[in-house]
Structure formats: structure tokens, C-alpha cells
Image: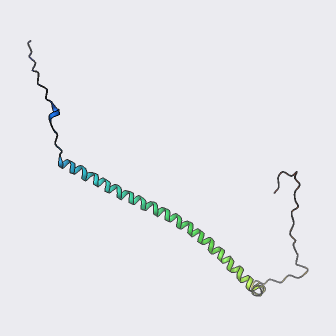
Amino acid sequence: MDRDFVVRKQVQNRAIVREVDQARQRELVRTGLIFVAFLIVAMFAAWQHHEAWRLETAAAVLHGERARELEIQRHLQLETAALRAPARIARIATTQLKMKAPTRETATVLDRVSVATLPASVVASR
């Protein structure tokens, strides 16, 4: 059983210069540019979605404010019309609504109740 072992000479790999594969580098750059382009498109779409949502919310708020302002405007126009023509309102009340003017016997004057100052010993008040 005599075995001979062959010892191979070790090759020094440090001296070998690896060449850059130009085709692989071009493919890597192309893939990177495609990824960056896709990322830009995705970010732009997300930004548009966010802006649309924000503008819809702002439009809903403005719509509510406009409805409130129109209601206030309607009340102010009615008040202005009432202050300009009290005789017209009295005529409409008596003719169309069949109301009657109050007499001295049926009319009641309500006085405002003044709130007395509370003593310092009172802890809570309404």
C-alpha cells in the first residue's frame, strides 16, 4: 500500500487581474436606471393621490362653510326686509296668515329678570 501523493504547486491568484465585464456593467446600469425611473413614477403617482385627497377634504370643508354662509345670508336678507318694511309684514300676517293684532287686554309685557349677585359663601352656581 504504497500511495504516492502528488503535491500540486499553489497558484498565486494575486497576480491575476480580473477584467471588468462591460456587458454586465451596462446591464447593471440599465437595471438601476429602470428601477429609478419606476421609483420616480411611483412617487409621482403617490403625490398626486395625496394631493387629490387633500383637495377633496378642503373642498368638503369649503362646501360646508359656504352652506353656513348662505344660511346666514338668507337670515340677514330676511332681517333686512323686515326692518325696511314692517307694515308689509303686518299686512302679510293679517291677510295671508289670518293673524290678529293684540289688544291691550291680551298683550303681556315681559320684563327681564336681573340676576342678583351671589354671596361669597355660594360654591356653585348655574
**Relative horizontal placement of residue 3, taking residue 83 as reference (left or right):** left
- Residue 72, image x, y percentages: 66, 74
Q: Quadrant of the rendered structure where residue 104 is?
A: bottom right
Q: Which residue is depicted at the point 76% across and 83% down?
A: 97
Residue 68's place in the image compared with 103, above or below, is: above
Q: Which residue is depicted at the point 73% across and 85% down?
A: 84
**Number of dots carrying numbers:** 0
- Residue 119, image x, y percentages: 89, 54
Residue 66's place in the image compared with 121, above or below, is: below
Residue 78's place in the image compared with 4, above or below, is: below
Q: Which residue is depicted at the point 42% across and 60% down?
A: 47
Residue lying at the far front of the rendered structure: 15
- Residue 98, image x, y percentages: 78, 84
Looking at the figure, which quarter contains the N terminus?
top left
- Residue 31, image x, y percentages: 26, 52
Looking at the figure, which quarter contains the C terminus?
bottom right
Q: Which residue is depicted at the point 18% across and 49% down?
A: 23
Residue lying at the far right of the rendered structure: 105
**Relative horizontal placement of residue 91, taking residue 108 as reference (left or right):** left
**Relative horizontal placement of residue 44, taking residue 116 as reference (left or right):** left
Q: Nearer the viewer, residue 30 or 10?
A: 10
Residue lying at the far top of the rendered structure: 1
Q: Quadrant of the rendered structure where residue 117 is?
A: bottom right
